């Protein structure tokens, strides 16, 4: 379930319904939230195993983009990779 923190006010009962599914299902439910501190997901946090990920560093992304570029047969200078990363706000997606 992506964007759990994006449940709108007009979606009454959405989080409660999700919690109900989590309680009864035998299958794992992955809930993704960009804003861990959102009031909208407070109740949901009591029913989830909380795993937090840190934003990747510029160096992490440079390495990954370098691997991808090589596999694609591209040659990109380090400064070019750094500009791409800067423009994306370190968002590796």
Image (cartoon, rainbow, N blue to C red):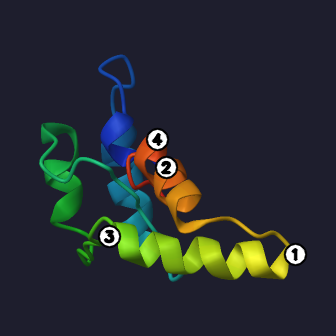
Q: Which mark is residue 57?
A: 3
Q: Earlier in the sequence, mark 2 or mark 1?
A: 1
Q: Position of residue 39 (x, y in %)?
A: 12, 39
Q: Earlier in the sequence, mark 3 or mark 2?
A: 3
- Local SS, label 1: loop
Q: Which mark is residue 73?
A: 1
Mark 2 to mark 1: distance in Å?
A: 20 Å
Q: Position of residue 41 (x, y in %)?
A: 22, 47
Mark 3 to mark 1: distance in Å?
A: 24 Å
Q: Which mark is residue 87?
A: 4
Name the residue rendered at 36%, 16% in the picture: 10
Q: Position of residue 78 (x, y in %)?
A: 54, 67
- Local SS, label 4: helix
In the picture of the structure, the residue carrying the numbered disc 2 is 83
Q: Position of residue 87 (x, y in %)?
A: 46, 41
> Does residue 15 appear in this view?
yes
């Amino acid at each position: 379930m992506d964007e759990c923190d994006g449940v709108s006010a007009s979606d009454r009962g959405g989080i409660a319904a999700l919690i109900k599914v989590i309680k009864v299902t035998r299958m794992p439910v992955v809930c993704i939230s960009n804003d861990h501190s959102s009031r909208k997901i407070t109740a949901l946090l009591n029913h989830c195993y909380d795993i937090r990920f840190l934003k990747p560093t510029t160096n992490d992304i440079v390495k990954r983009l370098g691997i991808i570029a090589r596999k694609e047969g591209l040659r990109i200078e380090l400064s070019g990779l750094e500009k791409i990363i800067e423009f994306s706000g370190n968002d590796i997606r």
